[in-house]
Amino acid sequence: MNMECNAIDLQDVTVTLLAGRRSIRRYEARPVPLDITTGLLEAAVCAPSAHNRQPWRFAVIEKFERKDKLARAMGVRLRADRMRDHDDAEAIEQDVARSRARIVEAPLCILVALTMEEMDRYPDSLRSEAEHTMAVQSTAMAMQNLLIAAHGFGLGASIMCAPLFCPEVIVSALDLPSHWQAQALVTVGYPAQQKMIRRRPLSDVALFLDRAP
């Protein structure tokens, strides 16, 4: 049986905040105030990171014109990729339109990227790949902080992982430093929808190796 996160009786305020977060994709039109946007980023950079190198980078996007330029550039790549897969043309256009709407209709978009500039360097591929994974993990923890902070501010937020499929498109469309590696686009705004979520019970996902749960 699935576990309903909102049905858990949680007394600890922090855990209650975590359990109440939802991935919200539809927002009211009102903008997110600058002080709240700054607060989201300040929460993000409180995350732990490998070697404390803080490899995360953020690009804040609010103007429609910039969001539209980004969405159109991403749509060109998405269309080309799916055409190479010989997908149905109508389904492709629906996918492109849905992706664009998620971006341009969000009052606030935050591009989350990482840089390897200050991470350790190794001569072998195994340790180099591990170091990159550490940077990815660090950036993901910062992004989770951002999501939780958004919920705490009464905002909704959702992650779009599409930038992973077109990182060079993102860098070009937003005129970012070439060493930034796009990881995700976080859309943010005041919620215009409510959502219920379910999670698997702990017995499905956790092993208590030294004691019974």
Image (tube, rainbow, N blue to C red):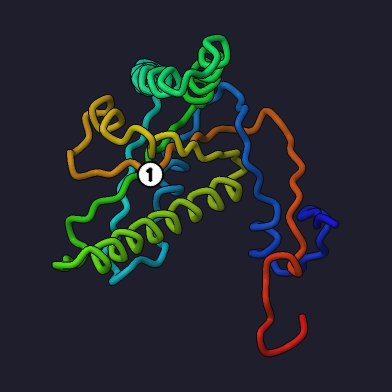
Quadrant containing the C terminus in the rendered view = bottom right
Q: Residue at x 43, y 37 (%)?
A: 185
Q: Residue furthest front?
A: 86
SS at mark 1 in the image: strand
Q: Please state which amino acid type lies under the numbered disc 1.
A: Gln
In the visual, does 89 lie left or right of 124? right
25 or 96: nearer the eye? Answer: 96
Looking at the image, is 109 positioned above or below residue 200?
Answer: above
180 or 145: nearer the eye? Answer: 180
Quadrant containing the N terminus in the rendered view = bottom right
Residue 135: image location, x then y, percent:
32, 59
Looking at the image, is 58 positioned above or below residue 137?
Answer: above
Q: Residue at x 32, y 38 (%)?
A: 59
- Snapshot quadrant of residue 9: bottom right
Q: Residue at x 64, y 33 (%)?
A: 191
Residue 45: image location, x then y, percent:
37, 57
- Snapshot quadrant of residue 155: top right
- Snapshot quadrant of residue 129: bottom left
Residue 125: image location, x then y, percent:
22, 63
In the visual, does 55 lie left or right of 96? left
Looking at the image, is 147 positioned above or below residue 99?
Answer: below
Q: Within 10 angstroms of label 1, few (less than 14), some, or many (20 or more) residues? A: many
- Disc 1 target residue: 183
Q: Residue at x 64, y 58 (%)?
A: 18
Q: Residue furthest bottom?
A: 210
61 or 213: nearer the eye? Answer: 213
Residue 66: image location, x then y, percent:
34, 21
- Give the number of marks: 1
9 or 184: nearer the eye? Answer: 184
